[in-house]
Image (tube, grey):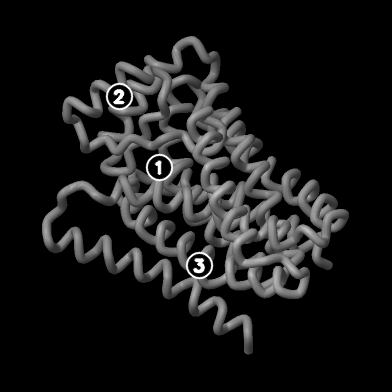
Amino acid sequence: MTLISILVGTLIAGMGSVWLAALLAYALLSRFTQHLLSLAAGALMATAFTRLLPEAFELSVVAGISPQTMFAALLVGLVFFFLLDKAELWHHGHEHGHSHGDAHHAHHAHDSHAHSHDHGTHADLAHHAHDDHQGHHHHSGGWAVLLGDSVHAFGDGILIAAAFVADPRLGVAAALAVMAHEVPHHVGDLVVLRQTLSNPRAALFKLSLAGGVTAIGGLVGYVLVGALQAYLPYFLVAAASSFIYVALADLIPQLQKRLSPRETAAQVAWLFAGIALVSALGEWAQH
């Protein structure tokens, strides 16, 4: 039953996020990805701090693991995901398209193959996807995008599996948090792939396959965590460090641009909506 839950959860998180992103991108509703960024940031942090870490520390007490060791594992996890990010295998360093200052251009010149995904208007997305296409010209068919997505999806699958093994409710929260933060990311990916592939359906199909790797990661995670049950607290801390890193290093920086008071209020509201969603899910699951 746990394995079935893992496979369903990973497929929803991996492929479901791609199809929802396609709905937003192809229906010219890309402006909503900005709200999804805030929602995802709130959901990721709430899942990490109110679900994954408490569960990890409760299990660590039973396993006789000290709090110092758990916090050290959290630190190692954050550094590990930072290094993966630098290798462009975890997240693609989304540069927000509205920041056209000298720093942005200097960074773009220094790292010509960075994935510069804008999550603002559809027109800006297309513009920055074109810049991305120039940087990725030597990567036939946008394979760099697909490789990065596949590696990330595999890692997400393992982390979701660890959450499901610990507690099915925790697994649901983790799967939804992953889906929330992957949607805005995939919107940018779809625009990049449509620049490198002439057929929009081919772009959606290839990205769906990359998203489907999440289920493979879930299967591997199920076997891995089952064989290493004593290390489950560490798997949960790894999942938490992934969520915290993505929220603070990838999503929050995109939300820090200057906005009107009304836009800022909407941003904060969506952030708290993400936190409330995870809290409500936890309360519902307990009844």
Picture disc at residue 147? none
Q: Earlier in the sequence, mark 1 or mark 3?
A: 1
CA gap, disc 2 and disc 1: 26 Å
Q: Nearer the viewer, mark 2 or mark 1?
A: 2
Residue under label 3, please give it: 49
- Extreme residue toward the left, this view: 260
Q: Secondary structure at mark 1?
A: helix
Q: Secondary structure at mark 3?
A: helix
Is residue 103 shown left or right of residue 248? Answer: left
Residue 122 appears in which quarter of the rendering? top left
Residue located at (25% from left, 21% from top): 106
User: Identity of the amino acid at label 1?
Assistant: Ala
Name the one closer to the observer, 236 or 29. 236
Residue 175 in percent (x, y) is at 61, 59
- Local crowd size for mark 1, using a 10 Å CA cut-off: few (<14), some (14–19), many (≥20): many
Q: Give the mark nearer the N terminus: 3 vs 2.
A: 3
Sequence-wise first label, 2 or 1: 1
Is residue 139 toward the left or the right of residue 103 in the image? right
What residue is shown at x 38% (from left), y 70% (from top)? 273
Q: Are marks 3 and 2 in contact (CB under 8 Å)?
A: no
Image quarter (top left, top right, bottom left or bottom right) of the C terminus: bottom right
- Amino acid carrying mark 2 in the image: His
Q: Which residue is mark 2?
A: 107
Q: Position of residue 205 (x, y in %)?
A: 60, 34
> Residue 25 bears which disc, if any?
1
Distance from the alpha carbon under mark 3 to that under mark 2:
32 Å
Q: Residue at x 38, y 45 (%)?
A: 27
State the CA–CA distance, disc 1 to disc 3.
31 Å
Placement of the N terminus among the 4 image quadrants: bottom right
